[in-house]
Amino acid sequence: FLFYGIMAYQLTGETAAVREAMASPMPLAPGQSAQALFPGELLALDGLQMTGEQARDEVYGGTVCRVITRIYQREDGAQIRAVSAVPDAYVQRFAQEEFVPQLITGFAIGELDAVYALRGGEAALYARRGSCVYVIEAPADEQAVYMLGARAKFGR
């Protein structure tokens, strides 16, 4: 019995270590394409300077999600993140991280209807297309986030 208890403990430790490693951001290697790591179209924000791109795997609801994050900077210095994730289990992240959906309609990411959610001074705009989830994360400013969603583009 003690043997099985030790083995279960070791397996739990390995699983936690694997999950932690998967959730740590990995910058893309020089010459490596984010598109090659993602099965759908990637979200991009027109009119903003992209300052970085990361690929990582995260676990939500027991499902491994591939997450590509493009980091942009506005003229005022604010950092904006455009996230493309698959599968749609990624949407569970917002409840886990205590984002509160707002009862405001009319938000979109490109042509996709989107949900506007807040957590303190942070805003998230998220939408789904098939098994892909697209997210714009920015400082909480309803009008600015609305405009970011309107300028969003999808591409390969």
Image (cartoon, grey):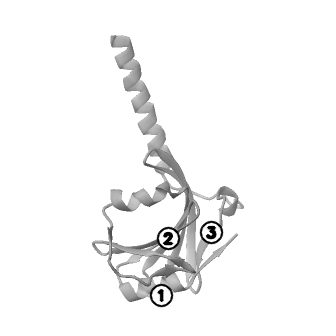
Which is in the foreground here, disc 2 or disc 1? Answer: 2
Q: Is residue 147 left or right of residue 49?
A: left
- Lateral position of residue 24 relative to residue 105, left or right: right
**Residue 73 — which label?**
none
Q: Residue furthest left?
A: 120
Quadrant holding the N terminus = top left
Q: How many other residues sit within 10 Å of disc 3, few (<14), some (14-19) or many (≥20)?
A: many
Disc sitting over residue 127 in the figure? 2
Which residue type carries mark 2? Ala
Residue drawn 55% across and 85% down?
151
Q: Earlier in the sequence, mark 1 or mark 3?
A: 3
Residue 69 visible in the snapshot: yes
Q: Are marks 3 and 2 in contact (CB under 8 Å)?
A: no
Q: Residue at x 62, y 59 (%)?
A: 28
* Other residues around mark 1 within 10 Å, as few (<14) / some (14–19) / many (≥20): few
Secondary structure of the residue carrying tag 3 is: strand
* Percent x, y of residue 96: 34, 56
104 vs 138, nearest the viewer: 104
Look at 66% across and 56% down and name the residue there.
37
Give the left or right position of residue 139, taking residue 134 as reference. left
Q: Considering only order in the chain, which callout, 2 or 3, is on the residue closer to the N terminus?
A: 3
Q: Nearer the viewer, mark 3 or mark 2?
A: 2
Q: Position of residue 114 (x, y in %)?
A: 46, 75
Instruction: Please name the residue that numbered disc 3 is placed on.
Output: 42
Q: Is residue 18 above or below residue 85?
A: above
Image coordinates for residue 127, horizontal then vertical, percent:
49, 70
Q: Is residue 93 left or right of residue 45?
A: left
Give the residue at mark 1.
Answer: 147
Q: Quick one: label 2, few (<14), some, or many (20+) residues within 10 Å? A: many
